[in-house]
Image (spheres, rainbow, N blue to C red):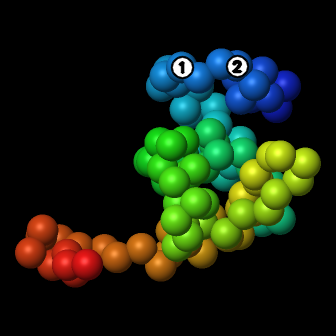
Amino acid sequence: MDNSAVARISTSKKKALTSSEKAAFSQHFWDAPLDALFDQKTVAVITSHSTSWCENMRWKGGGIPYLKFAHKCLYRKRDVLAWLEKQQIVTATCQYKSG
């Protein structure tokens, strides 16, 4: 899927993405340079979270750093990767920190 197809998908109304659409977003993300900017739909696919989670974390704080341009929140690829690296890895639920 080319970049224009990804752009068309990202501007469509809220609906569940198909597996091929998720694959297109993922491929677009991984092929991009580290300074590339992505919308919350792409970041949600990469992090396995919902777009609502992205919105809530912007409001609460503690989420992925973002840039705001004229009412649009964008995430830099290097920030998404850094955030992913910082996430706690556990092999059993008893390892989760209580908060």
Residue denoted by label 1: 15
Closer to us: 11 or 86: 11
| Residue 21 horizontal/vertical position (percent) | 58, 25
The vertical placement of 66 against 73, above or below, is below
For badge 1, the amino acid type reads Lys
| Residue 79 horizontal/vertical position (percent) | 67, 70
**Residue 90 visible here:** yes
Residue most extreme to the left: 94
The vertical placement of 58 against 3, above or below, is below
Residue most extreme to the right: 70
**Element under label 2?**
loop
Please indicate whether residue 70 sits to the left or right of residue 51 in the image.
Answer: right
Q: Quadrant of the C terminus?
A: bottom left
**Residue 5 visible here:** no
At x 17%, y 71%, the residue is 91
Residue denoted by label 2: 12
Closer to us: 66 or 89: 66
For badge 2, the amino acid type reads Ser
Please indicate whether residue 45 sits to the left or right of residue 79 in the image.
Answer: left
